[in-house]
Image (spheres, rainbow, N blue to C red):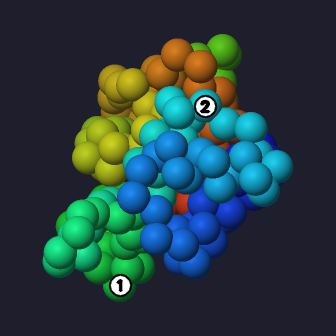
Amino acid sequence: MRERQNRLTKIKELIKTHRIDSQEMLLELLTQQGYTVTQATLSRDLKMLKVGKISDGWSGYYYALPENELVSESEKSYIQDVRRGVLSIEFSKNIGVIKTRQGHADSVALALDILSIPEILGTVAGDDTIFVILRDGMTKEDLLISFKTRIPEIDA
């Protein structure tokens, strides 16, 4: 779990300090820093960090981190729905059960779907319970890291 968080921190640092125009270049820089990562994992990491490519105006595109201040008001609202509603999270392999406050499961599941948490394949909501299905290869620890990155105040 800590390894992924360290890697995410390193990716942000590399993007801030280098002009990176391809995943191959980023993979090479990560390898030079001692990180072993696949292209698929790197793609998930970039999606989680909301990294995008922007034009330099004349010769191409390069990776850039989003400005924290640019988080949309609607995204802030969905994050608040998750914070307000989640009571606990438990897993058995790739299926999780999120317990919510009474009547909050639907709004929390909708928020998780809209926030596009990369580890989550889908959700099914009841009244105070949500079933969460993780993507192949994802673990509870991966999801909790995503939560701590995107929704830091959640006590999962």
Relative image position of residue 17 (x, y in whole percent): 57, 78
Which structural element holds mark 1?
helix
| Residue beneath disc 1 | 69
Does 63 sit left or right of 26 as displayed? Answer: left
Residue drawn at x 60%, y 60% is 11
- Count up the numbered dots: 2
Q: Amino acid at mark 2?
A: Thr
Residue 38 is labelled as: 2
Counting residues from the N terminus, which is met first, the one under dot 1 or under dot 2? Answer: 2
Q: Residues within 10 Å of mark 1 (few under 14, many from 20)?
A: few
Of 124 and 100, nearer the camera is 124
Q: Residue at image x 50%, y 23%?
A: 134
Observer-nearest of 8 and 148: 8
What residue lies at 67% left-to-right and 64% top-to-bottom? Answer: 9
Q: CA–CA distance between discs 1 and 2? A: 30 Å
Residue 39 picture location, percent across and down? 53, 33
Q: Position of residue 65 (x, y in %)?
A: 42, 70
Q: Secondary structure at mark 2?
A: loop
Residue 153 visible in this rendered orientation of the protein: no
Q: Is residue 26 visible?
A: yes
> Which numbered circle lies on residue 155?
none
Q: Is residue 11 above or below residue 137?
A: below
- Can you say whether 129 is above or below 18 in the image? above
Query: Which residue reaches farthest left?
Result: 57
**Disc 1 marks which amino acid?**
Glu
The quadrant the N terminus occupies is top right
Compared with residue 6, is residue 14 higher up or lower down, i.e. above or below?
A: below
Q: Mark 1 or 2, which is nearer the eye?
A: 2
Image quarter for residue 8? bottom right
10 Å crowding of disc 2: few (<14), some (14-19), many (20+): few
- Place of residue 15 in the rendered image (x, y in percent of width and height, measured from the top left): 52, 68
Q: Residue drawn 74% across and 38% down?
A: 36
